Image (tube, helix red, strand yellow):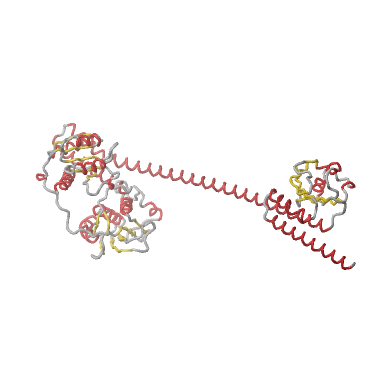
Amino acid sequence: MDRELASERGSEQKALAARWSIAAEAMEALAGARSLDAVTNVLRAFARRAVGADGIAIVLRDDDRCHYIAEDSMEPLWAGQRFPAASCVSGWAMEHGQTAVIADIFDDPRVPVEAYRTTFVRSMLMVPIGRIEPFAAIGAYWSEFGQPTDNEIALLEALARAASTAIENGRLFEALEALNGELDQRMRERTAELERAQESLRQAQKLDMLGQLTGHVAHDFNNLLMPIVGGLDLILSGKRPDAIERHASIAMQAAESAQTLVQRLLTFARRQPLSAAAVELPALLDGMRGLLSSTLGPRIEVAIDLPATLPAVHADAHLLEVAILNLAVNSRDAMPGGGKLSIAGEVRRSRLPAGLAPGRYMCLTIKDDGVGMSPSVLASAMEPFFTTKPSGHGTGLGLSMVHGLAGQLGGTVEIDSSVGKGTSVRLWLPVERVAAAKGGTPAAAPFAERHPGKVLLVEDNELVRNSTREMLAEMGYQVVDTERAELALGMIEGGERFDLLITDHIMPGMTGVELALRVRVDHPHIALLIMSGYEGIDLIAPDIPRVSKPFRHKHLEACIAAARAQVAS
């Protein structure tokens, strides 16, 4: 008898251990559940086996009703049905937050007997789900009358607590995800708002800079146009024939000053046509000694320290001379009582300024011991038209021109200065990979050897076309002119013979470059010359001669000679 009792107890303990093992597996699965559906699926899969019941049901509170959303049972119960919470055991459990333990469904006032009479249920457990305010319940049902055991109650309550934790965690995760989404959306909106504000600020700054630039350009050009218009008006009046040459000379000086102003603006904007080549700085500075001495005056000592072994730089020699002269003049004006200007150079590969591509650079340093600049002046020093000089004593384009030239060549400019300690300007220029050619530029051939012939002139601006036609006629050429490249190409392909094609670069339709390239391939006997104001000039094939507007008679003549020399060779 004792053995049978011991065996029975052993079997019960094994069964109980198995149920707790199932419950532990269920709780592990519930730990990863993040939604009501996921929790329902876990309970439906494990709860009945863990408790040892004949059926289980999961009930969800739906306002004043109880919705039986799922079940796992030996026979169908109430899945999908809704009952009044006031007359439902699950409603009582959720309302009171207590477990309902019912040994006999026919002997408990909480049970709606008629709903249970047609089922197999005779005893039951109903455990609320939700710690603070229950929102669901899980019921276990048996087909026999009897008090559910303490272990059965403990197992079902443990599963209900795990389900409560899982759903509450799921809600927290959902709230966190919603919060993260809201924060992310707010951040995107804030970022977009900041970008719009920054873009508006940039546009405002651009408009402000454009307004200042336009005002300065208009002021300077009107000052230059005044002697041109006034001089031409006096010439056209015919009242002072003896003063025509003087008026014309004044107008030409003003026009050349206007040309210089445009070149400086283009250099600042990095649109200046360049004739970049290998330039030997020691030779360049040696050739400038006389000009620097006469420009700076006797009270300024000039010290140039450039070893003859320095490699050549990639630059436009003429514009580089202008840039160095501008810097020297700035230094002179900063030393009204005299002082020392030193120019030195060294080649650097490392410790380059930000923004420069890796490579070898010449650092040309122009230093003075003048009055120096305040931080506010230094911050604006390279802005166009910014100047501390009195009105009429500077355009404010010197440093901006130097900065633009350096940038267009692939270098940069740095300035160090403080009040009372002088100024040091470092001009960084890329070292030329091709050695500088020795010797000077070949002289142009005399006009008598250039054999004037028939010229096709293509220019869409009527005033420029008329002016250029007059220059060509003065040189002895027979001129045919047109305003469109397509018309010019039609003339040539139609069999009309020309010795020279002079074409503008930027025109509606076919550009001057496209026209020149077509003619060079199909009619190589025609000499080519391209005129340009500024835009895209560096895109022209380097072996096609060019002349930059505005040009004088002698400039046009020299460029024509170079163009015809190419065909002759």
Q: Position of residue 530 (x, y in %)?
A: 23, 43
Instruction: Give the x, y percent position of residue 121.
Output: 84, 48
Residue 549, visible in the rendered structure: no
Is residue 17 rendered to the left or right of residue 270?
A: right
Position of residue 3 relative to residue 331, above or below, is: below
Query: Which corner quadrant holds the N terminus?
Result: bottom right
495 to the left or right of 401: left
The residue at the point 18 percent across, 59 percent down is 438
In the displayed orientation, state which residue is furthest to the left.
448
Q: Quadrant of residue 151?
A: bottom right
Q: Nearer the viewer, residue 307 or 556?
A: 556
Total number of numbered labels? 0
The residue positioned 60% from the left and 50% from the top of the image is 180
- Of residue 309 and residue 454, the one placed in the foreground of this image is 454
466 or 501: nearer the eye?
Answer: 501
- Is residue 366 or residue 177 the one in the foreground? 177
Q: Is residue 308 above or below residue 202?
A: below
> Is 339 left, or right, of 187 in this rendering?
left
Visible in this render: residue 107? yes
Q: Position of residue 248 (x, y in %)?
A: 18, 39
Residue 197 position within the rendered picture, expressed as x and y whole percent measured from the top left: 49, 45
Image quadrant assignment for residue 335: bottom left
Which image quadrant for residue 362?
Answer: bottom left
Left/right of residue 60 with respect to residue 388 in the rendered view: right
